[in-house]
Structure formats: structure tokens, C-alpha cells
Image: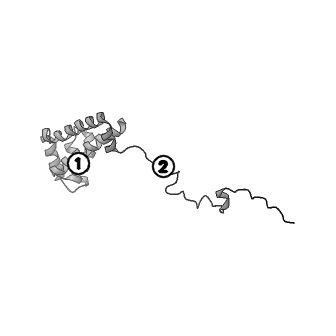
């Protein structure tokens, strides 16, 4: 007498493998749990949206023209040179020199102290830093507006 074999019930894939402790399990790198940033990049968005592109280009043109039209105000540049040559960067003497020269504008003391310590009295570095801050400002405004 032969026995009729009954089909085994199908087991799920997870039941076939030995159990894994949660502490030792790591999610797969390309698995479905991975967080994907599907937002278009800054330049792709600029290319796709003509209004944002035109506004950003006008703003960028104004920023670039600012260097040629305004440059440095004479009183600020004298202040920069005087404090940059006062003492070594990030020293207490430089802090006092910056504080003494910026009494009418006390909010500028930490900013001028840091910038004169880093950039010194080199005009090209100041222009590059200010242009970089303006471009960063444009990018932040663009990201906020979307």
C-alpha cells in the first residue's frame, strides 16, 4: 500500500530563513525603505520654470552689477584696512579695534571681527566673499519660494 503524499503547505520566504535579530539586521542599500529625494535639482528647476529662471537671472544680473556700480563705500574700506592691520587675526586687540570703530553700528562688530580676521585687507577676497553670500542668498530664496 502506498501512501498518498499530501502536498506541503507553501511557506513564506521569511519563514524559510533563520530568524534575524533586529539589532544585527541592516536594511538593504537599494531597498524600498531607502528615502529618495525626487525633487528636481536647482538647475533643472530653473530650466523648467521660465518665471523663476527670469527672476533669478535678473537678480543675478543685479548682484553682478552691484560690484561695478557700488564697489566698497570709502568709509567701510578704510575701516576694513585699519582693523585688518591692527593685530593678528582673532586676537583680543583686534576685537577692541573693531569694537572701537563700529560703535555706531554695534551689530557689525562680530561680523567685521570675523571677516577682517579671515579676509584681511585684500579687496578681491572681500568681493568674492560678498558675491558668494549674495549667490547663496539667491539660492535660499529660490528654495523657499518653491
Any part of residue 65 in sight:
yes
Q: Is residue 141 above or below residue 18?
A: above
Q: How many marks?
A: 2
104 vs 32, left or right, is left
Q: Are marks 1 and 2 in contact (CB under 8 Å)?
A: no
Front residue (pair 17, 140): 17
Front residue (pair 83, 133): 133
Marks 1 and 2, how far apart at CA: 34 Å
Residue ID at (67%, 61%): 16
Determine the secondary structure under disc 1.
Answer: helix
Front residue (pair 64, 33): 33
The numbered mark, 1 or 2, whose residue comes first in the sequence reads 2
Any part of residue 93 in sight:
no
Could you say which quadrant of the image residue 70 lies in?
Answer: top left
Residue 129 tag number: 1
Determine the secondary structure under disc 2.
Answer: loop
Residue ID at (49%, 55%): 30
Q: Which residue is mark 2?
A: 35
Q: Quadrant of the N terminus?
A: bottom right
How far across and down, in percent of the image, does residue 67 sit?
A: 16, 42
Select label 1 or label 2 by which is in front: 2
Q: Quadrant of the C terminus?
A: top left
How far across and down, in percent of the image, does residue 38 sit?
A: 43, 45
| Label 2: few (<14), some (14–19) or many (≥20) C-alpha neighbours in 10 Å | few
Amino acid at each position: 500500500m502506498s501512501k498518498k503524499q499530501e502536498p506541503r503547505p507553501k511557506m513564506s520566504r521569511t519563514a524559510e530563513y533563520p530568524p534575524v535579530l533586529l539589532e544585527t539586521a541592516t536594511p538593504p542599500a537599494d531597498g524600498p525603505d531607502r528615502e529618495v529625494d525626487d525633487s528636481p535639482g536647482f538647475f533643472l528647476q530653473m530650466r523648467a520654470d521660465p518665471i523663476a529662471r527670469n527672476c533669478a537671472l535678473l537678480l543675478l544680473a543685479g548682484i553682478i552689477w552691484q560690484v561695478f556700480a557700488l564697489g566698497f563705500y570709502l568709509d567701510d574700506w578704510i575701516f576694513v584696512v585699519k582693523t585688518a592691520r591692527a593685530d593678528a587675526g582673532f586676537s583680543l586687540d583686534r576685537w577692541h579695534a573693531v569694537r572701537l570703530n563700529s560703535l555706531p553700528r554695534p551689530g557689525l562688530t562680530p561680523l567685521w571681527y570675523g571677516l577682517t580676521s579671515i579676509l584681511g585687507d585684500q579687496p578681491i577676497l572681500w568681493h568674492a566673499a560678498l558675491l558668494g553670500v549674495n549667490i547663496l542668498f539667491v539660492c535660499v530664496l529660490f528654495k523657499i519660494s518653491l
